[in-house]
Amino acid sequence: MSVAVRSLFILIIGACLSTALTVAQDKSSKIDWKSDLIFLERELPKAHLNAFHTMSAEQFHKMVQELAARSDKASDRQMLAGLMKITAAIGDSHSGIHSLPANLRFSVVPLNLYVFADGLGVISASPESRDLVGGRVISINGHPSADLVQRMKLLTEGTNDSTRSAFVPTRLIRPELLFYEGFAAAPDQYEIVVQKDGQTFTRKLTMLGRQPDGSPITGGLSIQPLPAANSDWLSAAPEVRPLWLQANNKYFWYTEIPDQNALYVQDNLVLSPDSGQTFISFFQEVFQRIESRGYKTVILDLRLNGGGNNMLFQPLKEAFKSTPIFQTKGSFFVITGRLTQSAAQNFTTFLERNTKAIFVGEPTGERPNHYGDAAAITLPSSGIEINLSRKYWEDSQPGDPRLWTAPTIPAPLTLQLFRDGRDPALEAIWRYVATPPEKQ
């Protein structure tokens, strides 16, 4: 089974409550980083199915030795930042830091950022920063946002650039991490410049504090395009949300679009909830509805699907192969995106090879053939758990070199489209459907 990368969605939510506290914690922790790095260098190649499919063994050794050489003078979280670079260099979405002791996690400023097609934007924030919400990030600590995005991707685990675009915002809101990478003058510095509606806002933000157990407060932090549920953070999305943002807290759901004679199906996990309808019974209901209603168009939205259990869609394969609408070009559309990963990629690759699906949206966050089924090793002194892939899923042609499944119809999301509540993927589908077949 291919395990979802949902664990990556909440990676490294820690850092300092204050500079003084950071120093005190780092000096008292007494982590033996050199022994941890010796353990990592010995065990990682044994634990990963093919640890050097992206980086070479020589590169790995050099990175480990350089980090070990800094261990006597570096703080614990500075060492963690170096470890993040090493795990990011593995080059697959299932391999990376899985679990951290509470005091090692980096604190965050109260923002959610998103890498849009036209730049970095603020998609949600705490009420105190409401004027930044919906604005374009020009710089952080005086550094252009585009430069920061590219540099911080080096500390972001992922299979491809699409994956890293999904997760890099979680690195950009951690002041101490920016400090260690040379993008801040102090561990608690965070000055952001945002342009919005013709105005420029410059704001110094303070990190959220810590819980009694040492874990950082995260507020509305979320890898989803909306703030975490039950938080008071404000969203840049309008009150009337497009379909893809209306129920992204559900495992799966569907709705009819009568004026298009279409069925819209959103699947956000390849999993069954603890109670209620199962994944298999949900799709069986979808198939029955398609058969009875005679839709002209069916849309399957996988853009927010981080994966799950790829065994669950095995019983559904024959229905996808035999149902006429899935085998009719121009009638079946699959929306993908940067969060389409793991078992959702297995699902996508099956649909690509066995249906007439037209793919719309963004490139997936996974290779058609990819590493997965991760299990963790634990660094003995720090207690950091690192997931490492144990299996290679070759669902596409052997040797398929593609970094992702690219959309047939690209539909990039811009900040303004997000603010306006428009969905470029659905709009692209309606344009295609309205185009005479001879012009397609």
Image (cartoon, grey):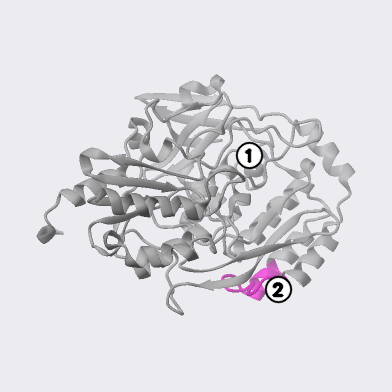
As drawn, which residue projects farthest toward the bottom?
A: 398
Q: How many marks?
A: 2
Estimate how packed mark 2 is, as few (under 14), some (14 to 19) or many (20 or more) residues with alpha carbons within 10 Å: some
CB contact under 8 Å: marks 1 and 2: no
Amino acid of disc 2:
Pro
Q: CA distance from mark 1 to mark 2?
A: 30 Å
User: Residue under circle 2?
Assistant: 45
Q: Where does the magenta region start and end?
A: 46-62
Q: Which quadrant is the N terminus positioned in? A: bottom right
Q: Residue at x 53, y 35 (%)?
A: 112
**In terms of secondary structure, where does tag 2 sit?**
helix
As drawn, which residue projects farthest toward the top?
A: 128
User: Residue under circle 1?
Assistant: 174
Q: Residue at x 36, y 61 (%)?
A: 406
Amino acid of disc 1:
Arg
Disc sitting over residue 383 in the figure: none
Q: Residue at x 70, y 40 (%)?
A: 14
Q: Is residue 196 above or below residue 369?
A: above
